[in-house]
Each structure stands twice: as C-alpha cells, then as structure tokens.
Image (tube, rainbow, N blue to C red):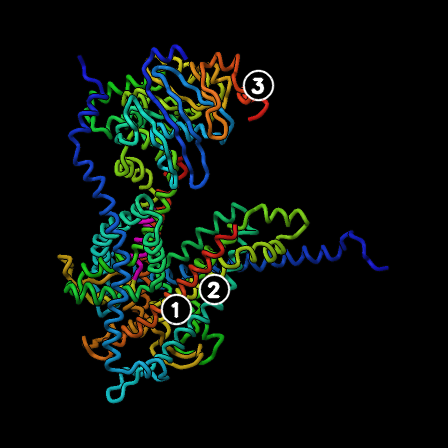
Amino acid sequence: MNNSENKSLVYSIKDLNLWYGDTKALKNISIDIPEKEVIAIIGPSGCGKSTFIKTLNRMVELVPSVKTEGSIHYKKLDIKKAKVESLRTEVGMVFQKPNPFPKSIYDNIAYGPRIHGIKDKKTLDEVVERSLRGAALWEEVKDRLDENAFGLSGGQQQRVCIARALAVEPDVILMDEPTSALDPLSTAKIEDLIHELRKNYSIIIVTHNMQQAARISDKTAFFLNGEVIEFDATERMYSNPKDKRTDDYISGKFG
Amino acid sequence: MKITIRERIKKNKAKQSYQNTIEKAMPLLFFLMASLSILVTLGIIYTLLRETIMFFTHISLFDFITGTEWYPFFENNPSYGIWPLLSGTFTIAIIAMLVAVPIGLASAIYLSEYASDRSRRILKPILEVLAGVPTVVYGLFALTFVTPLMQTFVTDLPIFNALSPGIVVGIMIIPQITSLSQEAMNAVPQSVRDGAYALGATRLEVALKIVIPGSFSGIVSSLVLGLSRAIGETMIVSTAAGSTPNLGFTPTESIQTMTSYIVQVSMGDATFGSTIYYSIYAVGMTLFLFTLIMNILANHISRKYREVY
Amino acid sequence: MKNNSVTPDEKQIDRRIIKNKLAKGVFFLGTLFGIIVLAALLIRIFTQGIAYLDFGFLSNFASRRPEDAGIRAAILGTIWIMSITIPVSLILGVSTSIYLEEYAPRNKFTRFIELNLANLAGVPSVVFGLLGLTVFVRLLEMGRSILAGGFTMSLLILPVIVVASKEAIRAIPQEQYDAAYAMGATKWQIIRTVVLPAATPGILTGAILSLSRGVGETASLLMIGAMTFIAYTPASVLDGFTVLPIQIFSWASRPQAEFQAVAAAGSIVLLVILIVMNTLAIIIRNNYSKRY
C-alpha cells in the first residue's frame, strides 16, 4: 500500500453498511481508493460488489427500501451532502448491459452536456468527437453519427456508453461488469480501452472474471458476503493472498 | 486557456436555480392532473346524488324501489316504480350473457389452447374489429337485420323486442370476454400444462382440468365485466328494444331498460326541474350503483387470482 | 379377464382423442361465430347503405327527404368535438400516467387513484352524459355546446388513455433510466428526454384507439343534448353540434326503410373512419415496437 500513500484519494469509505429491507448487503466496509488507478472488485455473485459501486454515485438509492450507514467521502466531500446530479457528472458509470438511448450516436454522446445546459452546436461537435476518440470509436462511426445507436454491435454500443460517460469529463468511471454481455473480441477492445483511460481517469470496475481483473487492474478488492476480505495490489493478491478465502476463490474452489 | 466542459457545467449549475423550481413543480402539477380523475368520480357521485335527492322529494324512495309500474308520462297519475326498468335491463343482460358466455369462452379456449400462432394472428385482430364497431351501428344491425331474421323463427315477433338487441349486446361483449379470459388462461404457466401433457393428457383435458381451474377467477372476472357492460349498454337497446316498460322476463316483447329510459327522456322535452327530469338521475344512480358494484367485484376477483402464480 | 394392468385401455384412449377433436371443432365454431357475425354485419350495412353513398351525402346537411340527406354537419361536429377532446384527454391522460408511473409513492392514495380509474373505465357512457349535462351544460353554463361535448368525451376516454400510456411507460427498461440517472439527469429531465420519447409511439397508438372509441360514441353526447337536425356549420366551440353516430341513430329511429338505408350509409362512413384510425394505430405500433 506504499504507492497509494503518495497519491491522493478519490474515495474514502468508512464503516459502510447497507441493507435492502431487512437483508444486510454490505458489512463494515472501510477502504481508501487512490486516484488514477484501475481498481477491480471481484467476488462470487451476490457478494455485494455491484451494490458497492452503486453506492459510490448513489445509484443504489434508486432501489426502494435501501438503507445505508457509515460514510463515503469523494475527494474529502461527504457524498450524502453533495448534490446527487453534480456528483454523477464527476463520477460516470457504465453498466453491465450496453444501454444506449434509442437516439442517434451523436445525441447519445451529447446527452450529458445537453442536460447540463451546454447547447451550442460547436462545443457539442467538439465534445462528441473528443469523447468518441476517447472511447476508441471515432474512426468506426464518424461517418454515421446521425444513425441510431441501436444499430451498432454490442461492443460498439458499450463503447458508445463509455463515450457518453466521458462527454461530461468525469474524474471517476464506475464500470459494473462492462464486458459480461460481450463477445471475446469486443471484450478485448474494451480492456484495451480501459488501459488507455487509466492515464486520465480513476476507474473502479466490477468483474466476475478473475483473469480480467488480473489483466487490467492495479488493485483488487475481494468481496465475500458483503464484506471486503482483502484489498491489495493485484499482483500481490494473486500471487500471495493473505486470506485463505481469497486463495480459495482465486484458485477456483468456489464462486 | 480553453475552459473545460466540467467548468462550464459547474457554472451552468450555479445559475440554474429555476431548474430546482421545475423539479419541484412538475410532480405537483402531475399530481393535480392525476387527482382530477378522483374529482370526476366525485363529480359523478355528487351530481347523481343531488338530483336523485331532488327526485325523492317528489316521489318516495319506498315507491321507487318497490313499485312495479313505470308510467312517468301519465299526466294525472304518473308512477315511478323501478322494477319494470330493472326487469328490462336484466332481460337484455340475460339474453346477452346466454350468447356471450359460451361463445366468448369457446373462443378464448380455442385461441389459448388450440390455435396455432398463425391462426391466432389472424383471428385476434378480427375480434378486435368486432370490439371496435360502434354501438350505434350494432343498433342499426339489430333493428334491420337480426329482428327480421328472428321473425322467421318467432312468429308474431314485434319490430321492437328484447330478443334481437339482447343477442346483439351479447355479440358486442364477446370480444371483451374472449380477450380477458384468454389473458387469464395465458397466465397459467406453460410448465403446468407441460406436466399434464407429459402424462398423456389431451388438449381438452388440459384445458378443462388444468387451464380453466387455474384461471377460474380471471374468467369469472371477465364475465362480471361483460355483464356490467351489458347492463350499461345504451344505443343498441335504444334503437331496437322499444320503450315499453315491461315487468317480467319477456324476450319477445318490447321492453325498456334503464339506459334507454334515460335516452328517451333526454331526447324529449322534459322541462328542467320537473319530476321526469329528476327521474333520469334516480335511474342513472341505480344504473351507476349496479355497474360500480360489478366492477369492484370483478377487480376484487381478478386481484385474488393474480396472487396464485 | 379383467383389465387391471397399468397398460392403458386402447379404446379409452381413442374415446379421449375423439372427444378432444370434437371439442376442438366446437371451440373453433365458437371462434368462427364472431367472424361470421362481423361479415354479416359488414355485408348488411354495405348493401343497405351503398345506394345512398355519394358525394352529395358527404356535402349535404340533414334533410327531411332521404335522398337529399347528408352528413356534412355531423362530420364537422365530429371534427370539432375531437379538436377539444384530443388535447384535453391527452394532456390529462399522459400527465396522470406520468404521475402514477414516475412520481407516485406506493401508498394508499396512489392505490385509490388507480382503483378509481379502473372503476371509472366501467362507468356506462350514459352516466358520463349525465355528469356532462349537469356539470358542463348547466353548472358551468356552457350550454349544449361543442365545448361541453368535448369535455364530456375527454373524461369518458380518459381512463383508456391512462391505461395505454401507463403500459407504454412501463415498457421502458430500467437500464434506460439507469443510463440517464448515471449521467446526472434529474427526474424531470429523464421524463422529458428518455421516458416521453420512448413512450410516444405507445401513447399515440393507445390514444388513437381510444379516440376511435370516442368517434363512435353516442350515448353521452346524446345526453349533452347534441342535436339531430343541424343545418349550419359550427363557427365556435359554443355552438350546438351533432356528430356522426348521433345522426345515424336519429335516422335509424325513423320508421321509413329509406332512412334506415341512409343510416347504413352513415355507418359505412363511420366504419371507414374507424378503420383508417385503427390502421394508423397498427402501423405506429408495428413500426416502433420491440426496440429494446
């Protein structure tokens, strides 16, 4: 954890507990997330990893009957006190299933800037190009920006979603199993992209795929039954896990 | 240096206080619109109730609900006993249900259990068209086609009678009964059917022993809704059933229903404030209560069955 | 020897198969009945009315002589009524469905609104007519006008539009909401930029279908006091009016067979209008459905 002390933190989470109704989904989570790194969150399904990243941009609050305790600080700001719309412009999110809007590629990318009051065509043109380039999609779609995004392949749709998130220039990108609905080739493209993006963004990615976590992340958190069992540099964790349960999971004994 | 999108967004956020106002105002606006439907219901109840009470200052409630004679147009000694109108209404409803229940259910079973996807795609739109025919056209059809047709079977059948509009009302509610029953039957999971087929059951056995019991409350609910529509149907009976308040089940005679009485008065020149004028509200109130009870009943029954699967 | 083994009795199976085939025939005949009636109705109305259906029928006012009678006032009245009903019922209906699907808390009052709408859908139209007569014609002093008729009609089809709009909104997948929320959109922005664009085809289909019900609606407007004999063109929403189905009803109630044939001619026009509207609704539904 030495190198993280040099870097400033994007998230500092203390004693986070979360319930869906009477079911406790997250238990006493306390971790610090450094900036400009790729953090992978792994664990068997139902371990709370998706729930966890949804607490980071408060998307989890959309679920009725959810209750949280503890604190999450985003760059020293308590996110409970932040305006949720502002938090989400700084913390973008990409979902499991590609979910572009049934609009043109251009309108998909311009969606964020537009709802935040940026209307002039010139700026929007620039943003669309820059975001699509950022998502490594510009060359593929530059001649058909006004076509419906639903006409693209699954992998391209997912990159539209990444470009859409980039358009408002966030600091953090949350990714909830972004490749689980994609074929291996598209998956490889997204992984390359994540590698590029880590230069400028902090990325927190949930994945059920341990090889993927090993390939792309700097640090990995292992979740089990709503608890963080281990959080360490990815290499160290894979080669020398401290906890028996991490070892069992990584070596495929369960999950 | 060029300002970034981020900074511009922040600047926009700072000055867009009207956005907060919109965020708060819209739900309120929509809530008011949604509450309007309650206001409409209250309006219906209030207008009916107020004028009905006026009616009962002229005619006693007791005479109204026990009277067996409905002669509002008698100058000297008018009588306002609701029973002839009720019996006319239910004569129509009974004939309609005799037509609609077997045919509606047979169609529902056929469409849900026997028909191939292709024939279902052809048959369902035809039923939808049948449901879309305006009642006034059905009325014309009853008067100028079904009545002459019936006259070949029933000698001495008068032009205005309960039989042919009753049949046509039944035809009108077939699509509703079919589609609601079929919906209920579709809610029976395929796995339950497959279980029976695996034991060698025929389609008929699956339909009668698995599907119908499994969707029974949905089917009953569709029948109650159909009955409620038959009771409230106005134009078919106004066109073809005549206007003779007749007590008893008299399908081959001219009758009058609650709805056709209301139409008859409103087409005439009943003076505002006269007993006849107020009587349409008393009759309307009776009609409203009957249909309301049936709708609540149908809702209740179908809600119960939804919990099964 | 008695057949006590578990081997099924062949004869018994044959009987069950025959029974099943017979039943299938019976059920099919039941389904066929609707088609036969529809065919009979269409053929009957068509052959009865076609002789009176010409250009004069569309352009003439009602008349005492069947051969001069026309539906000009009725067509114009229907258009006038719809020009009030369409905006009023759409604004009320879509707003109500947005409230119920997007904003309403899961409480007793919301359930009450929904139950109330369901029951309102089952209220006979003649009762809506009584409401319109009392509230719009008398209490609000609109008289027997287009305005009173349009408002009454709007309330009558409101429940149907609400149900259709709610279904259209409910068909939007949660992922679409997630995408917009994650971009920092507010609730109203999501409704404006995601929900309404996606739900519009569904809402439109439902609206056209319920409006086509309104075009054929007779009883409630009869109660409002739509007149059956109008020989002028309405100039404002406060003028009296007649509509196509009322005109048909008044001709159908005449004893002369000629007028019944005129009523059939009017019915043909009405049915054509409804078929056009329904076709439009189906086209919209087919072109825009299954996008997710």
Mark toward the start of the polypeptide (1 vs 2) = 2
* Apparent side of residue A45 relative to residue B29 in the rendered image (left or right): right
State whether residue A149 appears in this view. Answer: yes
Question: Which residue position holds label 2?
Answer: B100
For the point 39% across and 68% down, which residue is it? B231
Give the percent coordinates (x, y) of residue B211.
57, 54
Question: Which residue position holds label 1?
Answer: B231
- The reply to whether the C-beta atoms of the residues labelled 1 and 2 are less than 8 Å apart is no
State the CA–CA distance, disc 3 to disc 1: 71 Å
> Where does the magenta region start and end?
C205-217
At numbered mark 3, what does the secondary structure look like: helix, strand or loop? loop
Q: Nearer the viewer, mark 3 or mark 1?
A: 3
Chain bearing tag 2 is: B
Question: Which residue position holds label 3?
Answer: A251
Marks 2 and 3: same chain?
A: no
- Find out whether residue B90 is within the magenta segment: no
